[in-house]
Image (cartoon, helix red, strand yellow):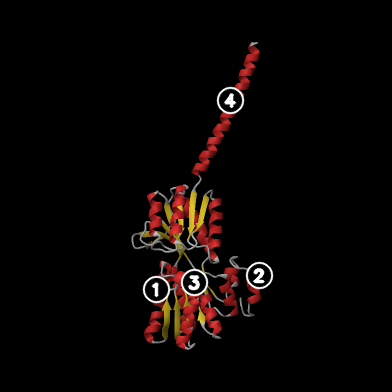
């Protein structure tokens, strides 16, 4: 009788022990989930070739590091981006990676995050007058310098058209300033004349196209070079040049190494683009976001003033792409493929 009671007691103890382990494991899992970094990635507008690549690369690296990513596309709406970020904050993000539409208005987004003790990485574009914790981008001064320097090397004299990016984007102004520093000595000597120069609403190719049409008319087609700040703007300008049988006769710069731009370079209608290995940019941003979520120091090696503070920054190096090095740059990196470009190659493309 006593032996039966003892056996039953042992069985109950075994069951209780198992239940305790299950409960304990459940609590451990919950604790692990709680400690899993949660990162928000807010992109102002997913239109355009590159931003999906940024997001995919960011998510892949963040997940490798054990982080959860919440991403949102604001579709070009400042107020929507602000609301989306507030929703992310409510969802418990620890770090916000912010690619803003309007670099001035976006300070309110940074303020909302900081008031909730959320760290902020300003991604690709620097949010002005804010307390961002880190800025990750490519060196825009160097990008603007590369664009202008390449054009003046191949067209040191003549009429120039400058098509800058959005006036809402501080990066567009930085590019334009860098370009002008290269051009100014040529302008002062009278070798180069800037016949048209303007910022472009929301970086829209359609706006660049219309602006280029007016410039062609005013100069009666006498244009040596178009200093377009990115490939979308370059594409709009090239369309206008095509309609006046000037494509391939006028030098055109760009930035981003979009497929359409690389094809134009292969065809000879665009002169150069500036390739920014964006997989690297997104990967670095993901790694730094996880560092911030864990309370670790970033790998920033310089600071950039945003008008309010000197923001720690990681600025990556851009690369000039021309007809001579398509295969050894964007193709070698897997950013573009020969299968996509090959039908458009001229015999002297490398």
Task: Assign a secondary structure to mark 4.
Answer: helix
Give the residue pinned by disc 4: 16
Q: Which of marks 1 and 3 is nearer the N terminus?
A: 1
Q: In which quarter of the image is the N terminus?
A: top right
Asked if residue 61 is positioned above or below residue 331 in the image, the reply reads above
Give the labeled residue for mark 3: 204
Mark 1 vs mark 3: in front: 3
What is the residue that sits farthest to the top in this orientation? 1
User: Looking at the rendered structure, which numbered label has been put on residue 238?
Assistant: none
| Residue 47: percent from left, percent from top | 53, 65
Measured in 3D between alpha carbons, the distance from the residue under mark 2 to the one under mark 1, in whole angstroms, is 37 Å
Structural distance between the alpha carbons of marks 2 and 3: 28 Å
Query: Is 326 drawn above or below residue 106 in the view shown?
Result: below
**Real-space Cα separation, disc 4 to disc 2, in angstroms:** 63 Å
Depth check: 80 or 143 in front? 80
Q: Could you tell me if residue 259 is visible in this image?
A: yes
**Residue 324 in the image: x percent, y percent?**
58, 77
Relative image position of residue 350 (x, y in whole percent): 61, 76
Distance CA(mark 1)–CA(mark 3): 20 Å
Q: Most extreme residue toward the left, as rendered?
A: 308
> Taking 147 as reference, is 38 above or below it?
above
Q: How far apart are marks 4 and 3 (CA)?
A: 67 Å
Residues at marks 4 and 3 touching, judged by CB atoms closer than 8 Å: no
Q: Mark 2 points at which residue?
A: 339
Q: In which quarter of the image is residue 21?
A: top right
- Can I make out residue 223 in this image? no
The reply to whether callout 4 and callout 1 are in contact (CB within 8 Å) is: no
Q: How far apart are marks 4 and 1 (CA)?
A: 72 Å
């Amino acid at each position: 009788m006593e032996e039966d009671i003892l056996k039953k007691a042992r069985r109950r103890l075994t069951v209780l022990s198992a239940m305790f382990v299950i409960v304990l494991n459940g609590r451990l899992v919950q604790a692990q989930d709680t400690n899993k970094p949660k990162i928000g990635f807010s992109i102002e507008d997913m239109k355009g070739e590159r931003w999906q690549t940024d997001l995919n690369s960011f998510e892949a690296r963040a997940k490798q590091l054990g982080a959860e990513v919440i991403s949102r596309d604001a579709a070009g709406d400042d107020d929507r981006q602000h609301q989306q970020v507030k929703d992310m904050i409510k969802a418990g993000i620890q770090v916000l990676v912010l690619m803003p539409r309007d670099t001035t208005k976006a300070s309110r987004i940074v303020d909302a995050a900081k008031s909730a003790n959320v760290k902020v990485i300003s991604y690709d574009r620097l949010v002005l007058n804010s307390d961002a914790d880190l800025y990750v981008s490519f060196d825009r001064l160097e990008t603007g310098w590369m664009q202008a320097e390449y054009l003046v090397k191949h067209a040191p004299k003549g009429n120039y058209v400058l098509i800058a990016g959005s006036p809402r984007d501080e990066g567009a102004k930085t590019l334009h300033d860098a370009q002008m520093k290269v051009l100014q000595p040529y302008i002062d000597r009278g070798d180069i004349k800037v016949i048209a120069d303007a910022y472009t609403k929301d970086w829209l190719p359609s706006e660049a196209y219309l602006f280029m049409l007016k410039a062609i008319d005013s100069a009666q087609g006498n244009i040596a070079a178009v200093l377009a700040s990115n490939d979308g703007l370059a594409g709009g300008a090239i369309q206008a040049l095509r309609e006046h049988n000037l494509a391939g006769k006028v030098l055109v710069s760009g930035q981003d190494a979009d497929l359409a731009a690389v094809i134009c370079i292969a065809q000879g209608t665009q002169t150069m683009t500036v390739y920014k290995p964006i997989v690297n940019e997104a990967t670095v941003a993901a790694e730094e976001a996880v560092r911030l979520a864990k309370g670790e120091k970033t790998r920033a090696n310089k600071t950039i003033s945003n008008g309010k503070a000197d923001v720690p920054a990681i600025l990556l190096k851009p690369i000039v792409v021309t007809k001579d090095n398509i295969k050894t740059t964007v193709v070698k990196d897997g950013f573009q493929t020969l299968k996509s470009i090959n039908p458009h190659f001229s015999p002297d493309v490398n």
